[in-house]
Image (spheres, rainbow, N blue to C red):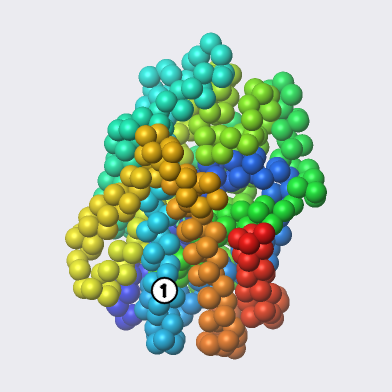
Amino acid sequence: MNLNETKQREQWGSKIGFILAAAGSAVGLGNIWKFPYLAGSNGGGAFVFVYFGLLLIIGFTLMMAELTVGRHTQLSPVGAYRKIKEKWAWVGAIGVLAGFLILSFYSVIGGWVINYIVKALTGAFHVADASEFATMFGSFISSPFEPIIYQAIFMLMTVGIVIGGISGGIEKYSKILMPGLFVMLMLVVIRSITLPNAMEGVKFFLVPDFSKITPAVLLAALGQVFFSLSLGMGAMITYGSYLSKDENLVSSSFQIPLLDTAVALLAGLAILPAVFSFGFSPEQGPGLLFVTLPAVFDAMPLGGVFGFLFFVLVLFAAVTSSISLLEVSVSYVVDELNWDRKKASLVLGLIIFIIGVPSSLGLGVWDHIKLIKGKDILDTVSFIAENVLLPLGGMLLCIFIGWIWGLDNAYKEVTNDGKIKFGLMHVWGFLIKYIAPIAILVVFLQGVFA
Ligand code: TRP
């Protein structure tokens, strides 16, 4: 980013810088850790099918919507809403809350990834029987202190980068490490689908059994579209606010979701075939990645090295996402309360860390605590954030654009005052004004009350 004197606002150094930052926010644990296990416990292909449907009508639509509002106002969410319509500023605040909650458990999982880097280094991925990986994972996450220490390390990394500013290192490293992650995932996919019996897993993942589509599957997929694309809390409004007026919003709004989905699909193909090959259960939830991939690495030549590299790249992807989560609340406090950036990052980072501790303990010493629908603490927090707050934020944004700001104003911004051709412009407008908000509401109500 460089300072643009006339507008007094930082802007992305280049088009590629913006795409990398936005894709860096989108591609993270949501793709590599969450997508495969959600697919595993929600009927495989049925989940993937529904995910694609919702991605088409809601994902692309909202990506464009957030970037448009951000670039138009050149402000982060609360200010952006306020600038267009004073009374709507509170919608931005819902996003700040969602970001808080998501980062609280995101840092727990980020900590697990760091622990697995250490495990790869110390040769723990070499065992006599693949079933030992489940025991190894279980005893790690249920221990009272270790995961919290790793969670703290993850949080410190996030805070450190947000204090230092995103422009310097991250943009540079992203250009190497994101493609690196892509290549590494491909290698793991190749190993995974060539394991004995792997085709059963490929079929499970890609061939939909429509009878498995239930209201709960729909709601899980809806939450995942928001979570994976970093939508519904204003992260993309913030990123869009750093975009210059002659950038092409239309192409970015397609590229980011496509890239994000490609990584999620690769992760699914890296994990689920191996799950079937080793005879693990696809329905085991958050542990799926951590139990399955070490077994795949163990079945690869130089598995320890691959495992180490893989988890380092996953950590990088997770950090480029977590900084965008922290950034939203930091910029809110900096703008609204006039705190300096360093104080805001440290204080908010500490509060979010503390809120995250129970999520970690809920998998061990507090595992008797079950909240919404029998879920543990981590699952409950993630349910409230992803399946309630993000869809709510997304729905309100659609209503805001379609009915308050007005489609004509949005069209002007998207097309740079008519300079960019966008053949589907009216389809997008129709989706924003009617289809997307209704679809979100229906899926939400069904999923919660069915
Ligand atoms: N999209 C990220 C992932 O898939 C997580 C994330 C980063 C996020 N920023 C966000 C989710 C903002 C929702 C909103 O890992």
Residue under pointer 1: 92
Q: Is residue 48 above or below residue 145?
A: below
- Residue count near mark 1 (Cα–Cα under 10 Å), binned few <14, some 14–19, many ≥20: many
Q: Residue at x 69, y 49 (%)?
A: 47
Question: Type of residue at label 1?
Answer: Gly
Q: State the image quarter where residue 150 is shown.
A: top left
Residue with the most extreme top position: 128
Query: Which corner quadrant of the image does residue 97 belong to?
Result: bottom left
Residue ID at (58%, 24%) = 296
Q: Quadrant of residue 416?
A: bottom right
Q: Position of residue 140 (x, y in %)?
A: 40, 28
Q: Position of residue 24 (x, y in %)?
A: 46, 53
Residue located 59% across and 41% down the image = 37
Q: List x then y, in percent, for residue 287.
A: 52, 34
What is the number of callouts on the image?
Answer: 1
- Where does the image place residue 77, in percent across and percent down from the top left? 41, 73
